[in-house]
Structure formats: structure tokens, C-alpha cells
Amino acid sequence: MNISVIIPVYNNEQSIGRAIDSVLAQSRPADEIIVVDDGSTDRTAEAAAAYGNKIRYIRQDNQGAGAARNTGIRAASGEWIAFLDADDEWLPDKLTLQTEHLQKHPQLQWTCGNYLECLCQESRQAPALPEQRILDVLNGRPFSPDYLQTYAKGLTGHTDTMLIRRSILLEAGGFSDLPRFEDLDLWLRIAYKHSKIGYLSRPLAIHHLQAGRHTSVIYPAAQAAHQLIHQHLNLAARMNRLDAFRPLTVFLLRQWMRGMLFDPTQAPQIRALLKDFSDLLPSRVRLSYTLLSAFPYLTALGCHGISFFVRRLGLRRRVVRKPPPFSR
């Protein structure tokens, strides 16, 4: 089993070394490490060069994380592809656990797993999902029979934990040029044909919440949400997977709109989503978000207040970013 690791990087001179070190420290070594520099203007190239022939360094003009990953996929020699963002890191047994899992279940074409969310500057980290929650959703199985169904229950699969057969990535067409959600877009396209996916409850990676994410395009979240959902409603229908995709759409919309409530300027975007996807959302959800978006500043103030007390009293199990400051 030959594994190529692809690390897209853009202006991450401070963290690229940590990412590479975490791959080199794997108990099951990677067969190839490809660092794709997406047009960095800092000292990322020098930081990567320090690793010499331990890595393969490729530089391209700035095109975004998806395009950088596609460059890595095309250049890879491995049968299997793993991804790691330049500001995150793997835990030491990540590849060992996943290769053992795939050997036990050779019918799987891709696998992923739990991960730690870390506010490391505050010395706080915790699993994205409790292990028991994952086991309950999987109902005791070692893999999910349908990625679409388990995604709608919260088992989304982080990019840092994905290990996918290269031929499947090529079959699906690789990452699209969507300015947002390009990873989710690809996982959905894969899932329409290859619904089974391995999912390990043990954390495999550390996702650093304070790190600047790899993005070179500012794009309204609501506009990106409209584009993604409309595209996949059509694609899921053509692939006869619409019944499975609809609950996932509700999950996504509720997740996105919940986040938008913290910003009163997003109220028109919430109402646009409610109008556009009214036939998909349950009536109670439409009513709740219609009322909440009708008084955006009051709602945002309440959301920030609740978040403050939850943090202060230590009631939240997950580690999440602090909401941006609220201002009228």
C-alpha cells in the first residue's frame, strides 16, 4: 500500500515545518510527501527547502487550496492519497491506524476519522466529536454504509483525516474551482458512487483553530452555500441519491444559518437561504430562523451573550473559535 501525502501551503512559513514534521514522525511512514506552494510571498519556500529530499516541493501561481491539492494529486506516485493542511498536524499513529483499517476492510475506497480541535494558545483541545457519539452513529459498524447519511448526523470527515484511493479522486474529477466548500463538494461527488467510507472514532489529526486558513478568495458564505446546494441537488438527482442528499442539505443549512446569527449583517443572507430552500427545510426551522433574522441585532447580542457565559462556565465540550466581536 503506497501512500502519497499532499500538503498545500500558502504563506505558512511559521507552521509548514510542524505539518511536515508530523508526517515524518508517523509510526507508519508515508511513501511520498508533496508540498505544493500555492504562490506564497513569505519564506515558505525556504522553510520547505530545509527538508531537502525528504519532501517533493512544487510551486505554482496562487490558485487556491483545491487547485494546489489537484496539482499534488496529478504529481503523486502513490496508490493512496492523504491530505494535510499546512497549519495543522497529524497524530503519530494516523497512517498506521488507517492502513490497518483498510487492510481489514478491503472493500473501502476511502476512509477518514475523528480529530482534535485545538486552541493551543489557550492550552485547550478536545475531540471534534465524542468517541461514543461516533460509535452510536455507526451503530457498531467499522465503517459508514453511506457517507451522505452519516454526514447528516454530524460525521462530516475532516480533510486532514482523509485517505483516498487516487483512482477514485481522478474518477470524481478532483477538487473543483469553487471558492468555498471545495473539499465538501469533492467528498459528495465521491459518495454518490462510493457511499461506504471508513470512520475511525480515535482522533487522527490536530486542527489548529487559531491558524489562518488557506484561502485567497473572499466570497460570501451564503452565495457559496446557494451554489453548492443547487449544484448538488441537480447532481444527486442524476445519480439517484436525492433522497439521501436532502437530509444532509437540512443539516448544512441549519449549521450555516446558526453561525450567521452571530453577525447581524448576515440577516438578509439568512432570509435568502430560507426563501430559496423553503421546500427542503421543516416548517419549525423556517419559522425559528425567520423570527431570529427579523431582529438581527437583538439576536446577535443574545448569541454572543450565551456564548460568553457558556465559555466562562466551561459548559461547552467542544473547543471552538471565539465568535468575532459584536458591534452595532
Image: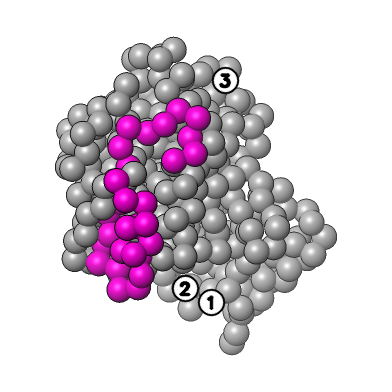
The percent coordinates of residue 66 (x first, y second) are 27, 53
The quarter of the rendered structure image containing the C terminus is bottom right
Q: Are marks 2 and 1 in contact (CB under 8 Å)?
A: yes
Is 10 rendered above or below residue 6? below
Q: Nearer the viewer, residue 24 or 200?
A: 24
| Residue ID for mark 3 | 139
Query: Does any portion of residue 94 appear in the rendered image?
Result: no
Q: Residue at x 73, y 68 (%)?
A: 308
Neighbour class for label 3 at 10 Å: few (<14), some, many (≥20)? few
Whether residue 242 sits left or right of residue 141 in the image: it is left
- In 3D space, how far apart are the residues under numbered discs 2 and 3 (Cα atoms)? 38 Å
The percent coordinates of residue 216 (x first, y second) are 31, 69
The quarter of the rendered structure image containing the N terminus is top left
Q: Quadrant of residue 161?
A: top left
The percent coordinates of residue 179 (x first, y second) are 28, 62
Name the amino acid, label 2: Gln
Query: Which residues are drawn in magenta?
Result: 24-53
Which is more N-terminal, label 3 or label 2? 3
In the rendered structure, does residue 40 fall within the stretch colored magenta? yes
Q: Residue at x 71, y 48 (%)?
A: 317
Q: Circle 1 sits in a helix, a strand or a loop, which is it? A: helix
Q: Nearer the viewer, residue 85 or 328?
A: 85
Q: Residue at x 54, y 24 (%)?
A: 138
Image color mode: one colour
Q: Nearer the viewer, mark 3 or mark 1?
A: 3
| Residue ID for mark 2 | 266
Residue 264's tag is 1
Whether residue 40 sits left or right of residue 271 in the image: it is left
Q: Circle 2 sits in a helix, a strand or a loop, which is it? A: helix
Query: Does any portion of residue 257 appear in the rendered image?
Result: yes
Neighbour class for label 2 at 10 Å: few (<14), some, many (≥20)? some
